[in-house]
Amino acid sequence: MTHLEQQIRQAMEQVAELSDCTLVEPIAANTLLLECGLDSLGYAMLVAQLEEDLGFDPFTELEVDIYPSTFAEFLAIYQQCANSH
Amino acid sequence: MPSLIQQLDNLPKTAAITCAGKHSLLADLMKNAAQIRQQYPQLCQRTIAINYTNLPEFVCALLAFDGWCSGIYLCPPNVSVPQQDIIHWPLKTKNKLTNSNLHTASPRSVQTTWYLATSGTTGEPKWFSHSFLSLTASSKHSHKLQALCWGLLYQPFRFAGLQVVLQALLSGADLVDAADYEPLAQMAVLKLGDVTAVSATPSLWRQLLMTGQLSELALRHITLGGEIADQSVLDNLKRVFPKAKLRHIYASTETGVGLVVSDGLAGFPVKWLEDPSQSVSLKVSKQQHLLVKPPHQICQTLSAQTDTQGYVDTLDSVAVKDDRVLFMGRSTGVINVGGNKVYPEKVEQVILQCPAISQAKVYPKKSPMMGELVVADVTVIDAGDPQSVKQQVLAICKNNLQRFEIPIKIKIVSNIAPDPSGKLNRKQQHD
């Protein structure tokens, strides 16, 4: 697991705790984001939290062509943005 | 103006409503509505509060009472109506009409005033009146529109939801209720219903895009409203549905104005400003607020916001950039979290209940997922453990606020300055 993936998973746990949500176990690469246990507000919080942790928000910086639907796609968008930083 | 039921009577075809897997023919709902009028003649010319039960019953009540009752309030759950002398629908057994509130009116048609609620700063809703004409100003009928099947993702007793319901009814299109589900379940309902037209907030569209299943629908009509539509979500939808009619709507419940933009670009063309050929006249004020002059009569509640020429201040901040007028958010400070309004004052008052907090300032943070999110700056009375203070604030917020109202971030700051206009910072009065 990359450091970036670890950070994302940690941030997901923080957001889940903050919003009284329970994450599913395990969250695999092909787990649908909307079935991870976070709702849409949870994802908005996650993106805000990651912006603070990582210093960037790929959804604002990159023109995201395709909205991610799985955990792997979400991670790939962050990886792509991290590479360009 | 003909009533809703009269207009449907004149349509070549009326459609069906699908709710929780059950189909209701509109023709049957119209018969039921006529029966209600026959069964309860004493309701004629009275004011009715429709309490939402389900979509077919709600539509049946609209059909029965528009053009029959003097006023209809569309009541969100747990919201009280401002008048005492009002009849609640559906009638409860214990509240059967008694002789004292019977009204012997002659059964003739009336122009009904519709009342819709917006939530207010103190949690009490504000009610805005509309005529049926103003509510249906943007509803259209054509053979193409008749062939559509609308998916309802908004609550039908709110302005945006009512627009979808009325558009479907008046165009003879089918309507599928998918309002009270999570995005994945909504997708399943929309797919099952072969929905071809959807109206949703940009935030909800992003969630539907995130399901990865949106392209399985054959959407021909796509509408975005209730929040600022950014270029990214418009581009994404255009990519998935290149042939669909893509419109984003600026609407305000207060003025009953709907501004439809269909060029796929965020904001609206600057040439619309002060263009007399527009159905709604538009201006930008010195404070960079959008002013609108609707063609219909506006609600009296807005008189203080109306200038001598009849332009109403929408209190929406705009910026003119190149040839577009872009929406920047509410000048009132109201935060829009995925279409849900958050009043900063309300959140600040809750935070100030925390004994450790001396001042609070709540403001929006831009979010690519939800449009805006809520964040708070606070000052503390004693410099103790910041983590513990944040936990206390969060606990109070969780007990007193809805989830979208809770600040996603609480920042402890040393000072909260008055706002740039130099107004006394109201939070200081709580010190």
Image (tube, rainbow, N blue to C red):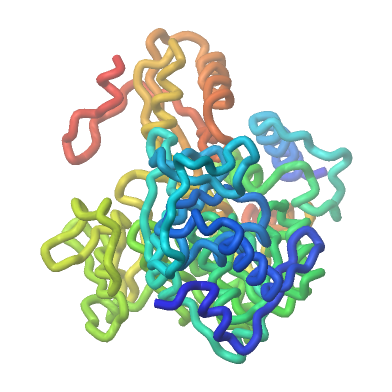
Residue B246 image point, x, y percent: 55, 78
Q: How many marks?
A: 0
Q: Residue at x 22, y 69 (%)?
A: B283
Residue B4 appearing in the image: yes
Q: Which residue occupies 61% across, 63% down?
A: B59
User: Which quadrant: the C terminus of chain B?
Assistant: top left
Res. A54 in view: no
Could you say which is closer to the camera, residue B180 or residue A59? B180
Residue B45 at what x, y percent from top left?
Answer: 42, 58
Q: Residue at x 30, y 25 (%)?
A: B427
Q: Nearer the viewer, residue B321 or B42?
A: B42
Residue drawn at 59 percent across, 55 percent down: B155
Q: Quadrant of the N terminus of chain B?
A: bottom left
Where B222 sits versus B128, above or below? below
Q: Residue B365 location, x and y as percent?
A: 45, 44
In the rendered image, the residue lying farthest to the left is B308
> Is residue B40 shown left or right of residue B313?
right
Q: Is residue B361 left or right of residue A73?
A: left
The x and y percentages for residue B125 are 42, 42
